[in-house]
Image (cartoon, rainbow, N blue to C red):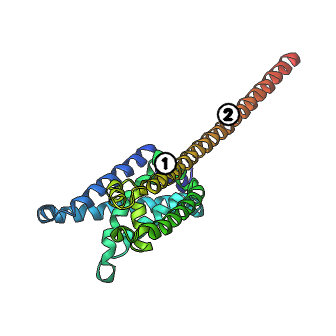
Amino acid sequence: MTTRDRVRALVEHKRFQHFIIWVIVVNAVTLGLETSPVVLREVGGLLHAADRVMLYIFTAEVALRLYAYGPRFFRDPWNVFDFLIVGISLVPASGPFSVLRALRILRALRLISAVPAMRRVVSGLLAAVPGMASIGALLGLIIYVAAVMATKLFSGISPQYFGDLGTTLFTLFQTMTGEAWPDIAREVMAQAPFAWIFFVIYILISSFAVLNLFIAVIVSGMEKTVTDDLAEAEEQHAADQARSDALILAEVRALRREIAELKEQRERA
C-alpha cells in the first residue's frame, strides 16, 4: 500500500470524519461566543487560540484530502466547497481584509459536506432549482400584474400601502406571506367594500397555489436525489457482488485444477 493509499484510508475513516464534524461544531460555538463582549473580556485570548488551532486542523484535513485524491479532488463539488471555505479563512483578517473576520462563521457550513444527510438535502434543493426558477418567474408575474391593478384601484384610498408601484409590490409581498394583511384589507374596505374580492383571489393564487408548487418541486427534487443515491448504492453493491463472485469462481477453478492434478498424480503412481 502506497503512502497516498494510507492517507486516503485515513481521511475516509469514520472516526476521522466524526472528529472533523466535532471540530466544526466546536468552532461554530467558539465563533458564536466571540460575539459576546463579556466572554471576550474573560476568555478572549483562549477563544482566539482555539480558533487558530481549529483552522490549522481544517487546513491539514484539506491538504490531506488534496494529497490523497490528487486532481480528482476538484471533481467533487463538495471538496471545492470545503477548499474555498478554508481558503477564505486563511486570508489575513486585518487592514482592508478585516471584514473577512465575519466570514469565519462560514466554516460552520462545512457541516453540510461532512454530514451525508445534510448533503442529500442540499443536493435535493439544488436539483429543484430549475423548477423553482420557473415557478419563481410565474409568481413574480402574478405579483406584478396584481400590483399594477392594486395601484390603479387603491392608490387614492390607501396611499401608504398602494401609493406607487414599488410600495404596492412590497405590500402585496407582505400580504402573500400572511403578515398583517387583514389590517391592510380592512383599511381599504372601509371605502371600497368589495376590495375583499381582490385580496381573497390574490391570496388564493399566490399563497395557496403558487407557493405550494415550490414545496412540490422541492419534494420532487428530494425524491430524485434519494432515488439516485439508492440506484448508485445498488450499482455499487452489484459491482462488489460481481467482484466477489468472480473471486469465488476463480478459487473454485483453481481448486478443480488442483484436484485434477492430484488425480493425475495418483493414476501415474
Q: Is residue 260 above or below residue 35?
A: above
Instruction: Check the image and name the residue furthest to the right.
Output: 268
Quadrant holding the C terminus: top right
Which class describes the residues within 10 Å of circle 2: few (<14), some (14-19), or many (20+)?
A: few
Badge count: 2
Three-letter code for the amino acid on which mark 1 is drawn: Phe
Image quadrant of residue 54? bottom left
Circle 1 or circle 2, nearest the eye: 1
Image quadrant of residue 94? bottom left
Q: Is residue 123 above or below residue 248?
A: below
Q: Which residue is mark 1?
A: 208
The one nearer the camera, 174 or 147, is: 147
The residue depicted at 23 percent of the width and 64 percent of the height is: 49
The one nearer the camera, 80 or 184, is: 184
Q: Is residue 93 visible?
A: no
Residue 60: numbered disc: none
Q: Position of residue 10 (x, y in %)?
A: 47, 50
The residue depicted at 73 percent of the width and 34 percent of the height is: 246
Identify the element where label 2 is drawn: helix
Q: Which residue is mark 2?
A: 241
Q: Earlier in the sequence, mark 1 or mark 2?
A: 1
Image quadrant of residue 138? bottom right
Three-letter code for the amino acid on which mark 2 is drawn: Gln
The residue depicted at 39 percent of the width and 69 percent of the height is: 162
Q: Position of residue 52 (x, y in %)?
A: 29, 65
Q: Position of residue 174 (x, y in %)?
A: 38, 60
